[in-house]
Image (cartoon, grey):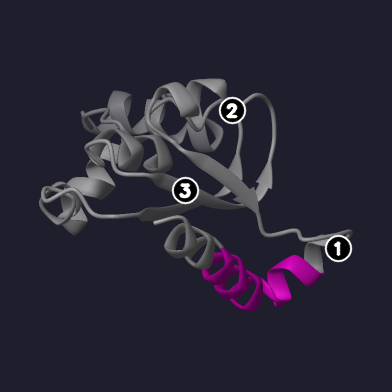
Protein backbone atom coordinates (compact mmCIF):
# COMPACT_ATOMS: atom_id res chain seq x y z
CA UNK A 1 0.00 0.00 0.00
CA UNK A 2 0.90 3.64 -0.15
CA UNK A 3 2.11 3.63 3.45
CA UNK A 4 4.65 0.82 2.97
CA UNK A 5 8.37 1.50 3.41
CA UNK A 6 7.74 4.67 5.36
CA UNK A 7 5.37 6.10 2.78
CA UNK A 8 7.78 5.76 -0.15
CA UNK A 9 5.08 4.51 -2.56
CA UNK A 10 2.84 7.51 -1.82
CA UNK A 11 5.73 9.85 -2.53
CA UNK A 12 6.57 8.09 -5.79
CA UNK A 13 2.94 8.28 -6.92
CA UNK A 14 2.67 11.96 -6.03
CA UNK A 15 6.05 13.13 -7.26
CA UNK A 16 6.72 10.87 -10.23
CA UNK A 17 3.30 9.63 -11.30
CA UNK A 18 4.21 6.06 -10.35
CA UNK A 19 1.49 3.43 -10.55
CA UNK A 20 0.47 1.28 -7.57
CA UNK A 21 0.41 -2.48 -8.21
CA UNK A 22 0.12 -5.52 -5.93
CA UNK A 23 3.70 -6.62 -5.20
CA UNK A 24 2.98 -10.35 -5.22
CA UNK A 25 1.36 -10.27 -8.64
CA UNK A 26 4.14 -8.08 -10.06
CA UNK A 27 6.86 -10.42 -8.79
CA UNK A 28 4.97 -13.52 -10.00
CA UNK A 29 4.53 -12.13 -13.50
CA UNK A 30 8.12 -10.91 -13.66
CA UNK A 31 9.54 -14.37 -12.90
CA UNK A 32 7.00 -16.27 -15.06
CA UNK A 33 5.22 -17.96 -12.18
CA UNK A 34 1.76 -18.19 -13.80
CA UNK A 35 3.27 -20.20 -16.68
CA UNK A 36 5.33 -22.37 -14.31
CA UNK A 37 2.22 -23.31 -12.32
CA UNK A 38 -0.07 -23.74 -15.34
CA UNK A 39 0.24 -27.54 -15.37
CA UNK A 40 -0.70 -27.87 -11.67
CA UNK A 41 2.44 -29.11 -9.92
CA UNK A 42 2.32 -31.88 -7.33
CA UNK A 43 3.55 -29.61 -4.52
CA UNK A 44 4.43 -25.92 -4.28
CA UNK A 45 6.80 -24.49 -1.68
CA UNK A 46 6.86 -20.75 -1.14
CA UNK A 47 8.16 -18.50 1.58
CA UNK A 48 8.16 -15.21 3.38
CA UNK A 49 10.16 -13.71 6.21
CA UNK A 50 7.13 -13.52 8.49
CA UNK A 51 3.64 -14.83 7.79
CA UNK A 52 1.06 -12.59 9.41
CA UNK A 53 -2.36 -11.07 8.79
CA UNK A 54 -0.98 -9.02 5.86
CA UNK A 55 0.40 -12.07 4.05
CA UNK A 56 -3.04 -13.01 2.70
CA UNK A 57 -3.48 -9.65 1.00
CA UNK A 58 -1.36 -9.37 -2.14
CA UNK A 59 1.98 -10.62 -0.88
CA UNK A 60 3.94 -13.25 -2.77
CA UNK A 61 2.78 -16.22 -0.67
CA UNK A 62 -0.90 -15.45 -1.20
CA UNK A 63 -0.31 -14.86 -4.90
CA UNK A 64 1.48 -18.20 -5.21
CA UNK A 65 -1.42 -19.95 -3.45
CA UNK A 66 -3.94 -18.29 -5.77
CA UNK A 67 -1.97 -19.30 -8.87
CA UNK A 68 -1.35 -22.91 -7.80
CA UNK A 69 -4.59 -24.19 -9.27
CA UNK A 70 -5.50 -26.34 -6.29
CA UNK A 71 -2.05 -27.90 -5.85
CA UNK A 72 -0.91 -28.21 -2.24
CA UNK A 73 0.93 -25.02 -1.24
CA UNK A 74 3.21 -24.95 1.79
CA UNK A 75 4.83 -21.77 3.09
CA UNK A 76 8.18 -21.75 4.86
CA UNK A 77 8.65 -18.64 6.96
CA UNK A 78 11.06 -17.14 9.43
CA UNK A 79 8.14 -16.77 11.82
CA UNK A 80 4.39 -17.27 11.96
CA UNK A 81 2.23 -14.55 13.50
CA UNK A 82 -1.48 -13.98 13.82
CA UNK A 83 -4.25 -16.18 12.51
CA UNK A 84 -3.52 -17.87 9.17
CA UNK A 85 -7.19 -18.55 8.35
CA UNK A 86 -7.27 -16.07 5.44
CA UNK A 87 -4.20 -17.71 3.91
CA UNK A 88 -5.81 -21.13 4.22
CA UNK A 89 -9.00 -19.83 2.61
CA UNK A 90 -6.86 -18.41 -0.21
CA UNK A 91 -5.33 -21.80 -1.05
CA UNK A 92 -2.43 -22.17 1.38
CA UNK A 93 -2.35 -25.76 2.64
CA UNK A 94 0.05 -25.29 5.55
CA UNK A 95 2.79 -23.06 6.92
CA UNK A 96 5.88 -23.81 8.99
CA UNK A 97 8.47 -21.68 10.76
CA UNK A 98 12.22 -22.12 10.34
CA UNK A 99 12.58 -21.66 14.08
CA UNK A 100 12.66 -25.30 15.15
CA UNK A 101 13.19 -24.33 18.76
CA UNK A 102 14.29 -21.37 20.84
CA UNK A 103 16.77 -19.41 18.70
CA UNK A 104 18.00 -15.87 18.56
CA UNK A 105 17.25 -13.74 15.52
CA UNK A 106 20.97 -13.64 14.74
CA UNK A 107 21.13 -17.44 14.77
CA UNK A 108 18.14 -17.68 12.44
CA UNK A 109 19.82 -15.27 10.02
CA UNK A 110 23.20 -17.00 10.28
CA UNK A 111 21.76 -20.49 9.77
CA UNK A 112 18.85 -19.51 7.51
CA UNK A 113 19.92 -21.51 4.44
CA UNK A 114 20.63 -24.61 6.53
CA UNK A 115 17.32 -24.37 8.41
CA UNK A 116 15.36 -23.69 5.22
CA UNK A 117 16.93 -26.69 3.48
CA UNK A 118 16.20 -28.99 6.44
CA UNK A 119 12.59 -27.81 6.71
CA UNK A 120 11.97 -28.16 2.96
CA UNK A 121 13.39 -31.69 3.09
CA UNK A 122 11.06 -32.69 5.93
CA UNK A 123 8.03 -31.23 4.13
CA UNK A 124 8.81 -33.02 0.86
CA UNK A 125 9.51 -36.29 2.67
CA UNK A 126 6.12 -36.04 4.38
CA UNK A 127 4.39 -35.23 1.10
CA UNK A 128 6.12 -38.11 -0.71
CA UNK A 129 5.20 -40.58 2.03
CA UNK A 130 1.54 -39.52 1.92
CA UNK A 131 1.29 -39.79 -1.86
Q: Is residue 42 above or below residue 64?
A: below
Residue depicted at 56% across the width and 74% down the height = 117
Q: Residue furthest right?
A: 102
Q: Give me the disc on residue 84.
A: 2
Q: Earlier in the sequence, mark 2 or mark 3?
A: 3
SS at mark 2 in the image: loop
Which residue: 51% across, 67% down?
125
| Residue 28 drawn at (x, y percent) | 24, 48
Question: What residue is pinned by disc 1?
Answer: 103
22 is higher (above) or lower (below) than 124: above
Residue bearing mark 3:
74
Q: Distance from label 2 to label 3 (Cα)? A: 12 Å
Q: Callout 3: 10 Å neighbours few (<14), some, many (20+)?
A: many
Q: Quadrant of the N terminus?
A: top left
Q: Position of residue 53 (x, y in %)?
A: 58, 25
Using residue 14 as the reference point, say whether residue 1 is left or right of it. right
Q: Nearer the viewer, residue 103 or 44?
A: 44
In the image, taking residue 110 as reference, residue 47 lies left or right, namely left
Instruction: Point out the frontmost of discs 1 and 2.
Output: 2
- Residue toward you, 33 or 91: 91
SS at badge 3: strand
Q: Earlier in the sequence, mark 1 or mark 2?
A: 2
- Report the span colored magenta: 107-122
User: Residue 6 versus residue 101: which sits nearer the camera?
Assistant: 101
Q: Marks 1/3: CA distance? A: 22 Å
Amino acid sequence: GAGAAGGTPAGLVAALGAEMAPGGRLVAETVGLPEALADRPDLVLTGEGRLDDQSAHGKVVSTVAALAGGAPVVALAGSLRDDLTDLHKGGMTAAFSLADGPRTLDELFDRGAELLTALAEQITRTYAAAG
